[in-house]
Image (cartoon, rainbow, N blue to C red):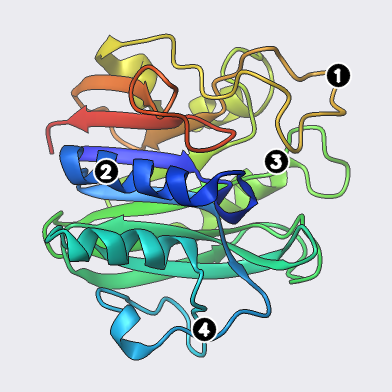
Amino acid sequence: MKLLTLNTHSLVESDYQRKLCDFVQAVEKERPDIIALQEVNQSADGNKASENELTGYFACEENTVIRGDNHVMNAAKQLWRSGVKYNWTWLKIKKGYGKYEEGIALMSTGAIIEARVIGVSTIDDYCNWKTRKLLGVRTKNTGDNWFFSVHYGWWNDKEEPFDIQWKKTLANLPSSSKIWLMGDFNNPAQVRGEGYDMIKESMWYDCYEAALLKDDGITATKKIDGWKESMQACDSMRIDQIWHNKKTDISECKVIFNGKNYPVVSDHYGVWVECEE
């Protein structure tokens, strides 16, 4: 099984259309089974997408409006045009940068048969950028595995600390034997005594640590959005991660979209995992 996670930064990125094409071409070549995406935007005032643009779409919530520039829809649409069929779902969470509807998404080569939304922040306010939710799916070709796209807050945030979000995650996950958390954890793996260690102490397994083959794992090499004012921000961080709730044989974990392994398409790099499942 091949897994990919990426904080896309999507419509916020300069030279966006080129980066979208670079992403699509990599997916077309590599064919990951599951893709988890964060910071997946659409214009708040954009026109509603037509029905024929929604091929492969699975609604995770009722009354969700997909707009014509929705990032994951346009990635999936380009892939379908190339004969590469991905199913997808998108969750609107909050208003971003004053003009976008920002959310998280999942893409799958198999049909999505069930989706789950979990609120993990203490607030649930579309106008508050610290609102956090998880989006999970089960698919037809991956058995009883659940895959969640996640984008957490920071360990030292006084309003929305990570430890509360993590405890709410554990309390609301489905009762499945196989759960994968994929995304932007905003907790650097090299910092001790904070979020990364909290996840590990909860008996979750970092796919990077378990992998037989791996690189340096770095997914952010500058002070990205959310870290620019933080004294804890490192020059290089491994904050995008894939965790599993079971010990699993991971053959490889590598960074993707870092300029060495496919072009850079976001202010984050992606994480690629291959495992036997």
In space, the residues marked 3 and 1 are separated at their CA atoms by: 17 Å
- Left or right of residue 69: residue 155: right
Q: Evaluate if marks 2 and 3 touch, with contact meaning CB atoms under 8 Å apart.
A: no
Q: Amino acid at mark 1?
A: Met
Residue wearing tag 2: 25
Residue wearing tag 1: 231
Q: Evaluate if marks 2 and 4 touch, with contact meaning CB atoms under 8 Å apart.
A: no
In space, the residues marked 2 and 3 are separated at their CA atoms by: 35 Å
Select label 3 or label 1 by which is in front.
1
> Tag 3, which secondary structure?
helix
Q: Residue at x 15, y 57 (%)?
A: 84
N-terminal label among 2 and 4? 2
In space, the residues marked 3 and 4 are separated at their CA atoms by: 27 Å
Select label 3 or label 4 by which is in front.
4
| Mark sitting on residue 64 | 4
Q: Residue at x 30, y 67 (%)?
A: 77
Q: Amino acid at mark 4?
A: Thr
